[in-house]
Amino acid sequence: MKAAVFQAQNALTLDDVPKPSPRPGEVVIRLQAAALNHRDLWILSGHYAGLKFPVIPGSDGAGIVCEVGAGVDPSWIDREVIVNPALDWGHHERAQEPRFNILGMPRDGTLAEYVAVPASALAPKPAHLTWEEAAALPLAGLTAYRAVFVRARLQAHEKVLITGIGAGTALFCLQFALAVGAVPFVTSSSPQKLDKAHLLGARHGALYNVSSWAKEFGEHYGPFDVIIDSAGGPGLGDLLDLAANGGRLVVFGATRGNPHEVAMRKVFWKQLSILGTTMGSPSDFAAMSELVTARAIHPIVSQVFPLDDVAGAFDVLARGAQFGKIVVRL
């Protein structure tokens, strides 16, 4: 089969590799589409823990079950499915256990014509989604669902600020907030992305690369009951200022690194909750899929590439030029 392979750090190739066979409890999926995540880019650039090369990357995928291993109900064959990339979560909803891992390293992932995964990771493909939309859903949708509902416990009419709009997870946060009647606001470094977010339903947006943006934005639209952030870094102080008393700040990434300092007095005086989150549990994935189906939510797909141009897909992701998910058609 044809597959994208990380041979080493910064070494992406397109190769013919053996088709996987299912182990007991596993299935093989003939993939129709896969999607990229920043995780793939960090692995390729060597900025990720537990690096393993060579490996087929990709955590998101949708396709048709074509083979089942021992102990798997054969009725799965020919079903259209999406894959939960959060493997071996563990026994507790509150957090993942040490054996938790994500599809696409160390286990070979979805940027290939076929992938073998545990049958327990399968969910029916939402019928209203195209293959490309379905492939865009799993990792970012799961991360957003847990951030918005499990950790932040966002309610109708609450004001929520979502940073870095244009990225897949941030867009799902926006769509999920709208689905439950919350009032979303967004930030970006791009005026065009703010305009697109407004068309999707964001109330207002701010350019975070403009000096004093947080003070002016807070005066006009704040404070915010919930803030969802994936950047961290020096901007964390602005988010503490923008949070309402009793507000919840949910963090699922640190693309700008660690903050230089945290004004602890703001945390305790404003009664703030700072909540970390990563991916989600199997029950989170099931609930996310149900919400997407019940509300007919369509993931935002930015661009679709053929597998032969997977390098071009990674280039767009590295430049941050996308609004939504970058999908590879298989």
Image (tube, grey):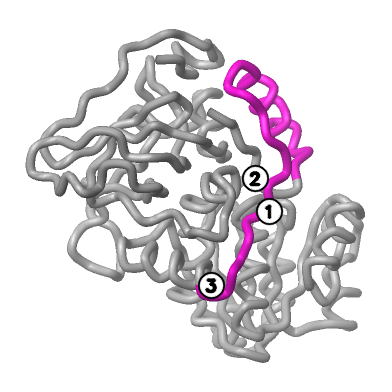
Closer to the N terminus: mark 3 or mark 1? 3
Residues in magenta, as a range: 294-322
Amino acid at circle 3: Val
In the picture, which quadrant includes the N terminus?
top left
Residue under the point 79% across and 62% down: 187
Residue 98 makes an appearance in the image: no
Q: Which residue corresponds to mark 2?
A: 325
Q: Which residue corresponds to mark 1?
A: 300
Up the image or down, 9 lies above or below 214; here it is above
- Residue 51 in the image: state x and y as whole percent: 38, 26
Up the image or down, 48 lies above or below 163; here it is above
Amino acid at circle 2: Lys
Closer to the N terminus: mark 1 or mark 2? 1
Horizontal side of 301 relative to 65 (left or right) equals right
- Circles 3, 1 touching at the beta carbon (< 8 Å): no
Q: What secondary structure is marked by label 3?
A: helix
- Residue 184 in the image: state x and y as whole percent: 73, 76
Q: Which residue corresponds to mark 3?
A: 148
Residue under the point 39% across and 32% down: 30
- Circles 3, 2 touching at the beta carbon (< 8 Å): no
Residue 199 makes an appearance in the image: yes
Front residue of 12 and 292: 292
Up the image or down, 58 lies above or below 259; here it is above
- Circle 1 packing at 10 Å, graded few (<14), some (14-19), many (20+), is many
Q: Distance between the residues labelled 1 and 2?
A: 6 Å
Horizontal side of 218 relative to 44 (left or right) equals right
- Residue 205 in the image: state x and y as whole percent: 84, 68
Closer to the N terminus: mark 3 or mark 2? 3
Q: Distance between the residues labelled 3 and 2?
A: 19 Å
Q: Number of numbered discs present?
A: 3
Q: Residue 91 carries which label?
A: none
